[in-house]
Image: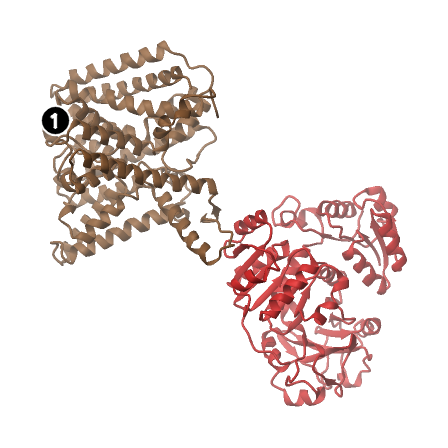
Amino acid sequence: MKVLIVGAGEVGFHLAERLSEESQDVIVVDADPERAEFVQQQLDVMTVVGNGASLPILERAGVRGAEMLLAVTSRDEVNLVSCLAATRLDVRHTIARISNPEYYARGSVLSREQLGIDLMINPERECAWETFQLLQSAAATDVAQFADGRVQLTGMVVKEGAPVAGRRLADLGQELRAARFVTAAIVRDGQTIIPKGEDCIQAGDQIFVLSPTSEVERIPPLVGYDRFTLRRVMIAGGSEEGEYLAQVLGEHGIECTVLDHDRRRCLELAENLPRALVLHADATDLELLEMEGVGGIDGFVASTSHDEINLLSSLLAKSVGAKKVVSLVHKFDYLPLVPKVGVDAAVSPRMSTVNAILRYVRRGRVTSVATLKGVDAEAIEFNVAVDSPIVGRPLREMHFPKGGIVGTVTRGEEIIIPTGDTIVHPGDAVIVFALPEAIPEIESWFA
Amino acid sequence: MSLRHVANVVGLLLVFVAMAMALSGGVALLYGDGDSLAIFGAAALTSAVGIAAYRLTRLEGDLTAREGFAIVTFAWAGTAVFGALPYLFSGSTHSFIGAVFESMSGFTTTGATIFSDVEALPHGILFWRSFTHWLGGMGIIVLAIAVLPFLGVGGMQLFRAEVPGPTPERLRPRITQTAKLLWYVYLGITVLQTLLYMAGGLSPFDAVTHTFATLATGGFSTKNASIAAFDSAYVDWVTIVFMYVAGVNFALHFRAITGRFDYFRDHEWRFFTAILVGAALIVSVLNLSGGGYEVSARGIEHALRDGFFQVTSITTTTGFVTADYELWMPGAKMCLFALFFVGGMAGSTGGSIKAVRVLLLLKQTAMELRKHLHPRAVLLARMGRQVVKEDVMANVVGFVILYLLLFLAGCLALSLMGMDMLTAMGASAATVGNIGPGLGDVGPTDNYGWMSGPELTVLTFLMLVGRLEIYTVLLLFHPETWKGRKSFK
């Protein structure tokens, strides 16, 4: 499949990397020659220098005959125009990254349906939504949802003295029959392990667990966290992400305080967020944060546009007792740092965008995919076809590759936590957790 | 500022007033009480002065904002003075200031009267009295704008200066059309209420005059006992409903007529209605518990009717009475006095502070309290989803302070002339708010006829300033209005 990516920023770069690893033909268009050069050196892709909204440049990049165009520059208008051009040139699928809600709102002149653009992704909103899901649980470092939100993948760091610490998975499975979950991966010392029954969970591990979304709240106590309900949230930094998050929280009736250092932005926020309390303050002003009750607050989200401030602000909040601290991190390089410094979770608008786009790109047999921060493995949701090799035999008889594990099987309304005896039927949706090297082989099981 | 411009427009408006007088003269002819000649004479004199002022000056270029304020103030003052002529010429009163007071009270829809026996007055004069209410209710200048398109852009300056409320809304892109629509709605409701009154057995004359007084939130009656003279529950309830209708923003009525029922969505409407109903219920319960109403089905209906009537009458600043509220329990009386400072909605014919300003002030106060809890909070006042801009809020706070100062200044002036405290407070609040009946010696069963010239002068001034929402009039007392740059827009 030939894929054109317009814009070689972090989103474009990451998409190009993922797609070329999956042996797609990727052509990257970027206006900056140095950036194009960098991409060419780093990845196995072709680059074209020029404006991605210009027809001659797109033609030079081979837009005719391309199957998909991903317009992911930081400018909405460029993305819209290049998608528009691509649809005219019979590119089958077009995806645009659009931040301004006025462009994708239903009924707008430029709406998706009118333009023939398949998917419009708003990075800030994706990110806010992900943050909201992270805030729901005291333990979660990562969340991703599958099967229309009925199955959730949750990443958590196991605390010292937690019920599951030091236990073999096989024993846990016997003891905790009531709690329905599958441990899909263990990350220890930067290594991702796809566990077998004899593997042991240790305190300090980050584990990834698949479970029915309705039963998610049973899991944090097992890894050593108190149950909690999200009632009060403070958002430090009135970025777009922060504003969207405040909106979502407001809609769910959660009390919300937003602060920003810019007075004019504060006025805007106060106007847009009737239900939130807006403060004109600095995200690292500890005295003020404490006065506004950051100690003991349920959720604290650092969402300024500066990663460094976000991390510092998160640490300050954590140090005075905020229960769940989430930091916005833009730079991919900083992501692995987050658990090490003691911040509970990180979200990245660009990573959210990459995820959303990949989810769409791989659709077909694959319905959903989640790329995790600082972890090699991916969670992929497959639809099982009638003639898929996985159909008809118990899972224990299948020689599933080492780097992969079957997480959950969704059959109609039912969510099955598989054992060795489980038999996959055609029409099931199967969520697989796998290391990149195992993905091609696993895909063949579902072909 | 060009005084010629002012004289020109004011002259034209006087011609209007003269026409209205002539109409009253026609009514006088019809009843043949012998007052027609006096009224026609007054009309002739008024039109002569008006035409002279109009012909001797010329309106060049656009009106400036300063001229707008001056025109509105002088037009109202002039209208009141010339509107007093019929009372003088017909011999209804021999006091010049008394007549001007009566006329000003009519045009400003206050309803305070110097006549102790109105039933003795001839029909033409009574009609003129009520007619001044009706003209002043929607505003003589709004009427002029509606029929005089050449005022054009300058019309907006006048409109803004006359229409009550912080920010008058436009129903149509052109100001002339907006003014016309408001008058059509006003006229339509007038016809409706007149018919309903006549269905209740009122004579056409009583029906029309009381309709004028209700819809303008005026309060002049042609009976000594006011609405109580009809002694009919039906008439009471009709009056309650239409007083309420007159206290609501006419733009809302206009939308309702054109099919957009926006009442419930309007936050000021909700506030206004809540205050009115709440106060009426409190007053009724207090009266039932010890105000001489028997606790039976009829007694309860009577208590509710009297409660709603008096509360609606005071809140909308109409000033009709069916019960002597001075005999009520202290709590009920105090409730009514508090309502002196609420008033109708912005864009209604009601006076006083206006519900929207009270609401905004409450919101501002709540915000200040919250600000103490969160010193760094950025808080905005809202009306529904709409954010209230800070300059509007500052204007509102300034207005309320000025209003209260004016009330106090009025009390002080009257007290210095020897009036007792309760009466002074009642009279001052009732005239600044364009309500009519006050407390003490100007209570619901009394009138203003006993007052001295200086006292009536003070009250006449208060009525004018209250009707034109203070700023318009007070600007003329600001030295900068009279010097410096020629125009600012």
Residue B438 x, y percent position in the rendering: 19, 40
Instruction: Name the chain under label 1.
Output: B
Q: Is residue A46 left or right of residue B83?
A: right
Q: Is residue A204 above or below residue B34?
A: below
Q: Quadrant of residue B250 in the image?
A: top left
**Whether residue B435 is visible:** yes
Residue B236 x, y percent position in the rendering: 19, 43
Q: Is residue A106 left or right of residue B379?
A: right
Q: Is residue A90 left or right of residue B34?
A: right
Q: Is residue A209 above or below residue A350?
A: below
Q: Secondary structure at mark 1?
A: loop
Position of the N terminus of chain B, as image quadrant, is top left
The amino acid at mark 1 is Leu
Residue B28 x, y percent position in the rendering: 16, 21
Residue B191 x, y percent position in the rendering: 27, 33
Q: Quadrant of residue B260 in the image?
A: top left
Q: Residues within 10 Å of mark 1 (few under 14, many from 20)?
A: some
Front position in the image: A62 or A274: A274
Q: Which chain is brown?
A: B
Residue receiving disc 1:
B121
Q: Which chain is red?
A: A
